[in-house]
Image (cartoon, coloured by chain):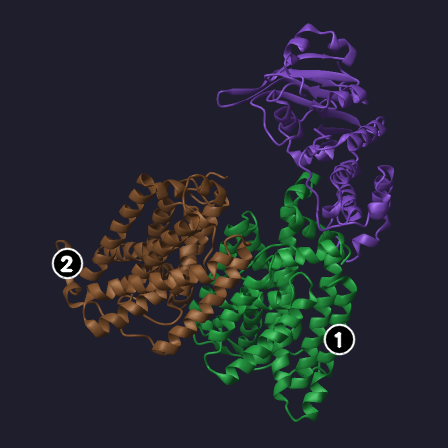
Chain colours: A green, B purple, C brown
Amino acid sequence: MKSSSTRLIVATVTLGALALLPPISLFLGQDFYIDLFTRVMIFAIAAVSLDLILGFGGLVSFGHAAYLGIGSYAVGILAYYHVDNGFVQFGAAVIAAALIALFIGWVSLRTSGIYFIMITLAFGQMIYFLGESVNQFGGDNGLNIERHSRFADFLNLDRPTVLYYFVFAWLALCLGFGWRLVESRFGMVIRGAKSNETRMLALGFRVFRYRLVAFVISGAMAGVAGALLANLTLFLSPSIMHWTRSGEIMMMVILGGIGTLVGPVIGAIVYLVLENVLSGLTEHWQAILGPFLVLVVVFSKTGLLGAAGEWRAKFPHG
Amino acid sequence: MADALLETRQLRKRFGGLIATDDVTVEILPGEIHAVIGPNGAGKTTLVAQLAGEMRPDSGEILFGGEDITRLSAADRVSRGLARSFQITTLFAEFSALDNVALAVQRAAGHSFRFWRAARREAVLREPAEALLAGLGLAERRHVAAGNLSHSEKRTLEIAMVLATKPRLVLFDEPLAGMGPDDSKRMVQTLLGLKGQVTILLIEHDMDAVFALADRLTVLVYGRAIATGTPQALRANEAVRRAYLGDEAE
Amino acid sequence: MIAVAEQVLNGVQFGLTLFLMAAGLTLIFGVMNLVNLAHGSLYMIGAFIAAATFNASHSFIVAIAAALLGTAAVGIAIEVVVFRALYRRDHLDQVLATFGLILFFNETVRMIWGATALYAQVPEFLSGQIQILPGVPYPTYRLVIIAVGLVVALFLYLLVMRTRIGMLIRAGASDRTMVAALGVNITLLYTLVFGLGAALAALSGALAGPVFTVESGMGDDLLILAFVVIVIGGIGSIRGAFIAAVLVGVVDTVGRAFLRPLFALFMSGFAADNAGPATASMLIYILMAAVLFFRPEGLFPRARR
């Protein structure tokens, strides 16, 4: 049960644990974990961005990995042209992701239900194919990125620990921002529209506009995650934009707890750690993960969106 | 009459072969409670739908405060002060009663592109919402999730939400539907309490309630407005009596 | 000119492959209100079974039959085990659960047949070319795919227009109560419709094997296109699926073949090399966006319940 105070506690504990990971990891001589959890936090940001519109807005956007990719490609392409300035790169990532989200949202939000799911899926795939076909930037094979983004002299992202805390700071920022957002007037409109769209329209709210803005904010946040990812892997590949990646991000949101903001962070941890562990055990780990997901979905009795609704009914202020 | 707050002029609506609204011309005066009654299938709900903006009439005009609103969307009519209360109560079930009303207040308070301050802590939203709920007797239940309220509490919450948009006129489609005698009496008192704050147009079958509430009635039969007047006057009206012959059940 | 005709025909062939997929998807959605992402997996399983059986038996008929039966069996198995729990659920739940199925099937196929593509060849008696017009040769096998696609389209048309099941489909009968009121055994109906959808996907995969590569995940990208087809055509409409599928197939194929040379006419080679394929790959989605802009419910939407 995730009431507001529970979530705060969970968030504090989780962020605290994440903050302490590098020193512990170094102490244990296992700096591989720093790398893994940097990746976890990046996807946590992406998952949080999806939860904003999925968990709170009820918008099942199945093409979210595209924004991740756009953010990455913005950084990568600028790096390719020797523009290493982090502010410029990240700025471009956010703006590019936001603009694409604006266009896709503008077309998709006119539809609803299953059409919406399919359309966001299709557009996500379109971005993927775009990435694949532009040969200049590696196309299918991908593109190496020479250098990390440069922000300031003291921020040397070449060092894993520095990069880790840089990503951590972004995660905390996004969580904090997301928190304020969902409790704000804007957030209330989005949540109200999820609860009862007809009523919101009858009250006179122009739901489409608010949803579009939420969509753009969500895409921009995922764009940040993408820019961070580019710095982690120093490699661009259209495969990060494949629709199955969108499915993975959605899985993280679901596993952790939809509509809670901190749940997706936990979901990202669980999913990526599980993936790591399972792939160490067998190369056929997806054959295990797949049915696991099916079971999670089938056995949450009222369905996952319904479960979140139930929590709300018991904790109206939660 | 130039004084009418809401008027229709020769409103017509048909569905294929069925004439739902047949050349209806009515006037609703400001400050009154005006009831629309008639046998089942008379076209009352269709009329309200056209007044609210959910349905476009085939021909005729609707004027509100002298302005022609025939082409206006429902949302725009709400901003002009013409609001509708729903027959099927549709609320934000997971939100508390207070949150529900606060959302309506939020709408009236301008745009909602505010991303930082917590809406629940904004006095400018919370205080009017609490006042509305208190005025309708729901103060104690304001933190209960709307889905968990009793049927009549939900209807009352519904009214609170409509009032939050500061309407000049409210359309009520069978506000007493599904209520037992005690709840009905309470609802009648609630509606009477609104007199002076808003003009009311209501559809209702419960004749006791209609006679307790209405300043004037319009009788609709087969889509036609066959008579308009005070309850006393219509009691004596021949055409009205004929229309209700055999329709005691209402 | 010949080149254009050839590409148009390729487009039609691709479109009909898509149609077989989309028809099954839209049928299942129309009758059971179920969105099944794993439909692409059924296509893939059909392709694998057909290719493997043909390699072993060298009989085309046996291969196709095995693919249809085998995939239908798998389809019915997942219908009973997974989908029965999902019919009343949110579309999100269906999407996620079937996404899990995709992961499972993709990996299972890799476990059985390995990660590299399976060799699938065109059977002897269908290889070669036919002169569809004097001086215009076209691969026989592709013509066969087109023919089969048209036959199936006709069959589905008759099914939808002339039978009781068809009536239910046209009525958009995803209302279990209404269906039961018509005296139909719902459970059986759903299973049969699902089996039919699976068989269509399997047929599509089995035929497409020799033309496209038989590998894990081959159905997933095609599935997205099938979704685009359904969205353009209107969910629940077989007719819409047919028209949209052929449209999408032709636009995509012709676009991929001719956009780069077309761009090269007025752009530098380098620019054309990038803009050409890039635009070609986006063409379908732009088409979809354009259709949705004017008709958010597709070209032939069902009447809303």
Q: Nearer the viewer, residue C18 or C180?
A: C180
Q: Is residue A228 visible?
A: no
Q: Is residue C122 left or right of residue B148?
A: left
Chain letter for the residue marked with disc 2 in the picture: C
Q: Residues within 10 Å of mark 1 (few under 14, many from 20)?
A: few
Residue C237 in the image: state x and y as whole percent.
40, 45
What crowding class fits label 2: few (fewer than 14 Cα within 10 Å), some (14-19), or many (20 or more)?
A: some
**Left or right of C73 in this view: A230:** right
User: Which picture quadrant has residue A29?
Assistant: bottom right
Q: Quadrant of residue B70?
A: top right
In the image: residue C35, left or right of residue C57: right
What separation in Å lies between label 2 and label 1 (alpha carbons)? 71 Å
Image point 62% across, 32% down: which residue? B54
Give the numbered dot on residue C130.
2
The amino acid type of the residue labelled 1 equals Val
The amino acid sitting under disc 2 is Ile
> Helix or strand or loop: what does disc 2 sit on?
strand
Would you name the residue on which mark 1 appears? A13
Q: In which quadrant of the rendered image does the N terminus of chain A lie?
A: bottom right
